[in-house]
Amino acid sequence: MNTTFCRQFFSPRMLIAFLMGFSCGVPLLLTSSVLQAWMTDRQVDLSVIGLYSLVGLPYTLKFLWAPIFDRFTLPLFGRRRGWMLLMQLLLMLALVGLGLTDPGQTPWLVALAAFMVTFLSASQDIVVDAYRREDLTDNQLGLGSSFYVNGYRVGMLLAGSGGLILADHLAFSQVYLLMAASLLAGVVTTLACREPQLSRGAPRTFTEAVWDPFVEYFSRENALVLLLFILLFKIGDQMASTLSTPFYLALDFSKTEIGTVAKLFGFWSAVGGGLLGGAILLRIGIIRSLWIFGVLQAVSTLGFSVLALIGNSLAGLTVVIVLEQLTGGMGTSAYVAYMASLTNKRFTATQYALLSSCMGIPRVIIAAPAGWVAEYTGWPLFFVGCTLAAIPGLLLLPRVSAQYRRDAQ
């Protein structure tokens, strides 16, 4: 058993998942926090900077063009690798183009270049998600998803923290050139990996590629229940994290304390949680992991309530962040693996894009009223409410589990 586990853990497929996650994680912050820093440096009006958040819309709407990647196969490298390579090369060019613009002189040209980066980045996400689902066996999905998520986090860390640090020593245009060059890791990985075998035929018409993925999914037994589970499983965790920074500041922690603990302990706890979650998934499977990690996520959220009662305690802050990030990383591994398991391999790109778009809906919806609720109830009760919000998702798990077993037969 130990030999089998080690062989899976250190297999080339896991390295591919990690490097592809890295390639997907790098562009995300280059069109948000890093770009905002660049625009602030060039004294762009704050109202204009706020509008730039709209360039991130492709990440939530990617299911609209995902059928293209299911329907059509490029002449070289196969159905998935061909599209991956094209999107990665175009993404590198788009980042170079964004780096050559000037936010102070041509802000709308910057917006167009940033939109192209997010569109191509979201397209890369679509194809990489499809590749991962088709390349990994059901037993490998959990561990592979954890490697992908951790690679994504490392890519975000390089682009976000690394990009801002480099910007103190280099021009922002040079920073973007370096970040574009870092995506060569994804290009090399795409060239070196193998094309997944297609067990079932691809859609034969574009209408079939657009319509059939939705018909196939919603014709399943308990389709709406499974979709509701995806919406609810991490809602408590998301509610808590939405206001975590204002909460820490309300307890009079300094920005330096928050940043240091979050970066030093939080990041590595999330990475460790992802790897630990993937290892456990490989041993006990997706459904049992969803049960265990879901409960751990909910319990860790109570730590915020305890910290609210304790007050300003750096040790308490560290424990809360470590537990929240550790259990969140574990939960995300199982969550992403479960979503991948729901897809039909004929329509992997479209169905996974739809499900992952749904995953982000609660975070958007709860962001607006969360502040009002916290203000009305106070921090301790707010985080108790976040813990209770995890219960509906857990209550759906028996039906999710039963359906998973039936689908596996």
Image (cartoon, grey):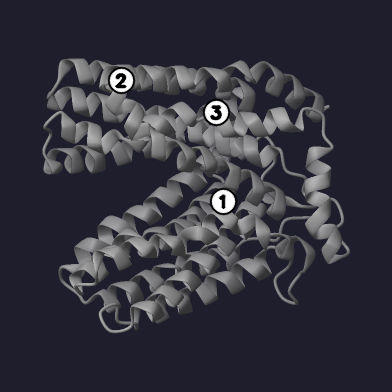
**Where does the image place residue 340, in percent across and percent down from the top left?**
65, 42
Amino acid type assigned to the residue bearing label 3 in the image: Phe
Mark 1 / mark 2, whichever is N-terminal = 1
Question: Mark 1 and mark 2: span between their CA atoms?
Answer: 50 Å
222 sits left or right of 81 in the view? right
Dot 2: what SS?
A: helix
- Label 3 or label 1, whichever comes before in sequence order: 1
Disc number at residue 377? 2
Q: Which residue is mark 1?
A: 12
Name the spot of residue 229 as percent of width and height, x first.
62, 28
What residue do we see at 42% from left, 63% from top? 27
Residue bearing the label numbered 3: 233
Image position of 121 (left or right of 226): left
Q: Quadrant of residue 68?
A: bottom right
Q: Give the residue type at disc 1.
A: Pro
SS of the residue at dot 3?
loop
Q: Residue at x 56, y 29 (%)?
A: 232
